[in-house]
Image: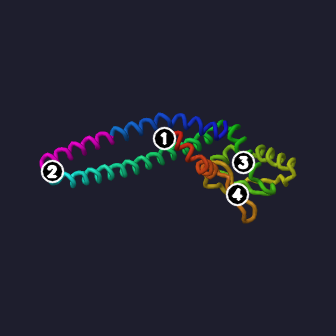
Amino acid sequence: MSLENILSEILKEGEEEKLKIIRDAHEMADNILAKAKEDIKEFKREQGEKINKEAMSVKERIITSFELKKDKELLTEKKRVLDEVFDKVIKKVKSLPKEEYLNFLERLILKYVQTGDEQLFISEDDKKIVDEGFLKRINEKLRTSGKAGNIVLSEETASILGGVILGRENIKINASLELIVEDIREKWEKEVGQILFS
């Protein structure tokens, strides 16, 4: 299952949450505006025409203040929902069946390897499923493509959720799951936001 398919599935799940957020925001806005209008109307009756201009000013400030607060809360909620969507992408990838996840790691290594002499840094969880057979298969494919084919698994674990980091001398290529999803988020965040919140 590709990241795009996973993202599409999660976006569908987020649609219901989006509608609830919008309904709640509208209900809260209606209640506050109704209360503000009622308060302003009563104030006008008690104070008369002399204070009418000031009351209008107060009303505008209340509404403006509320709208700013509502916008800020909505932006905060949108960010929270987007964070949740992209966290679900990482969880979906991590919960792939073992062979699918190993194929994902293999594609990352083959895509980002430079010479074929790199050290492979992976998470502690991934060390439990990456074995010599996996490394042998990778190295054979690298040799077939004209690279050294000497990838070795580092004894050090990487502080990542998934994916790989390839290291050679002073160079490290970060193809961690977190960074990949962050790159996808930067490219797709506006479009995902429009789908979820329009």
Which circle marks residue 173 in the picture? 4
- In the picture of the structure, the residue carrying the numbered disc 3 is 108
**Pair 1/2: label in front:** 2
Q: Is residue 32 above or below residue 16?
A: below
Query: As rendered, which of 18 and 108 lies closer to the eye?
Result: 18
The amino acid type of the residue labelled 2 equals Glu
At x 51%, y 40%, the residue is 196
Label 4, label 2: how many angstroms apart (C-alpha)?
72 Å
- How busy is the neighbourhood of tag 3: few (under 14 within 10 Å), some, or many (20 plus)? some
Q: Secondary structure at mark 1?
A: helix
At x 17%, y 54%, the residue is 51
Query: As rendered, which of 32 and 176 lies closer to the eye?
Result: 32
Using residue 167 as the reference point, say whether residue 90 is left or right of it. left
The answer to whether one can see residue 78 in this image is yes
Which circle marks residue 49 in the picture? 2
Using residue 136 as the reference point, say whether residue 123 is left or right of it. left
Residue 123, x across and y down, in percent = 64, 51
The amino acid type of the residue labelled 1 equals Phe
- In the picture of the structure, the residue carrying the numbered disc 1 is 197
- How busy is the neighbourhood of tag 1: few (under 14 within 10 Å), some, or many (20 plus)? some
Q: Secondary structure at mark 3?
A: helix
Using residue 149 as the reference point, say whether residue 90 is left or right of it. left
Instruction: Return the disc, 4 or 3, that comes first in the chain's sequence.
Output: 3
Residue 105 location, quadrant: top right
> Is 63 in the magenta?
no
Instruction: Return the disc, 4 or 2, that comes first in the chain's sequence.
Output: 2
